[in-house]
Image: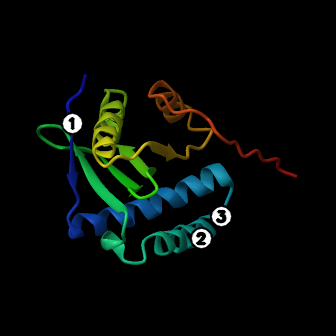
Amino acid sequence: MKELNLVLMTEEEFHIFIESEGSRYAESLCKYKGLQREEALKKAHFETQRLLPHGIKTPFHTFYRCCNWTEDVGTLWIYANEKKKQAFIYQITIFEGYQRKGYGKATLREIEKILRKQKIDTLSLNVFYENQRAYHLYKEMGFKTVSMTMKKEL
């Protein structure tokens, strides 16, 4: 079992992360939703501004660096509302050189520990169906499919 620490991002790290995340999200919108690059970048920027009007200081949103003992292996963006006892993973990324080495599972285990201490009882996330590797990881970690969007190109 991999050991991993979740370390809160600094404001400087957050700005680097959010710029990278916007590009990554836009790429996903192109790949999985069929959007053109320019449209996807606009949507990614709009969604980021909508979700994070106060940047890193937006209430209920927390940003982590996922670290093994010597280096960063990924990032995590989570929304956790203690009053509603619900949390949502907006983004979890394990960097390419560390994938398939147990860091995804370790990250999920660590955030579950943190959320249990906050008395959160539900953790949700979205995954694109085409991302089967992530889909199977989440199923293995106990996530259940609760809804499904289907699409047909005309």
Q: Is residue 12 above or below residue 151?
A: below
Residues tagged 3 and 1 counted as in contact (Cβ below 8 A): no
Circle 2 residues within 10 Å: few <14, some 14–19, many ≥20: few
What amino acid is labelled 3 in the image? Gln
Mark 3 / mark 1, whichever is N-terminal? 1
User: Of circles 1 and 2, which is in front?
Assistant: 1
Residues tagged 3 and 2 counted as in contact (Cβ below 8 A): yes
Q: Is residue 9 above or below residue 126?
A: below
Q: Is residue 60 above or below residue 86?
A: below
The residue nearer to you, when weighing 47 against 118, is 118
- Kindly identify the residue that appears in the image at 38 percent across and 67 percent down: 19
In which quadrant of the rendered image does the N terminus lie? top left
- Kindly identify the residue that appears in the image at 37 percent across and 27 percent down: 100
Circle 2 residue: 38
The x, y position of residue 116, in whole percent, is 32, 41
Circle 3 residue: 36
The residue nearer to you, when weighing 11 against 23, is 11
Give the SS element for disc 3: loop
The x, y position of residue 128, in whole percent, is 59, 44
Left or right: 3 with respect to 31?
A: left
Circle 1 residue: 4
- Kindly identify the residue that appears in the image at 68 percent across and 42 percent down: 147
Circle 1 residues within 10 Å: few <14, some 14–19, many ≥20: many
What amino acid is labelled 1 in the image? Leu
